[in-house]
Image (cartoon, rainbow, N blue to C red):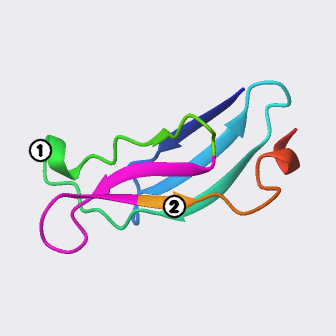
Amino acid sequence: GYWLVDDNVDGVPLTVGSFASGRQAHLINTDTVHDGTQGSHAHPYFTADNAWAIFTSNREGRPQVFGARLPAGFLRALD
């Protein structure tokens, strides 16, 4: 299995990791700006097939939902 998390640092990066190996890798910066509201939190999750990371960002001035397709082999490289 894999995990997906955002970090509260500049750019609010999404990091993906493997429970089995403990390895992790940067996927994308959400570019959201935390303003203390839930709309500024990325709330990342995987689609059921682990092909996409879905997240929210206010990088365009209002909260919106975005998706980042995981590159081919991205998860296998973490195993």
Q: Quadrant of the C terminus?
A: top right
Residue 76 is inside the magenta segment: no
- Residue at 45 percent of width and 47 percent of height: 7
Quick check: 16 left or right of 39? right
Q: In the picture provided, is 34 more to the left or to the right than 55? A: left
Question: What residue does disc 1 label?
Answer: 37
In terms of secondary structure, where does tag 2 sit?
Answer: strand
Residue 55 image position (x, y, % from top left): 38, 50
Residue toward you, 67 or 28: 67
Residue named by callout 2:
68
Q: Residue at x 40, y 66 (%)?
A: 11
Label 1 sits on a secondary structure element that is loop
Indicate the position of residue 70 as horizontal and vertical percent values: 65, 57
Q: Is residue 30 left or right of residue 70?
A: left
Name the kind of residue labelled 2 in the image. Answer: Ala
Residue at the bottom extreme, as displayed: 60
Residue 67 figure quarter: bottom left
Q: Which residue range is magenta in the image?
A: 51-66
Please tell me how crowded label 1 is: few (under 14), some (14-19), or many (20+) other residues with Cα within 10 Å.
Answer: few
Horizontal arrangement in the rendering, residue 52 relative to residue 18 (left or right): left
The residue most toward the front is 49
Q: Position of residue 52 (x, y in %)?
A: 55, 51
The residue under label 1 is which amino acid type?
Thr
Q: Is residue 19 above or below residue 28?
A: above
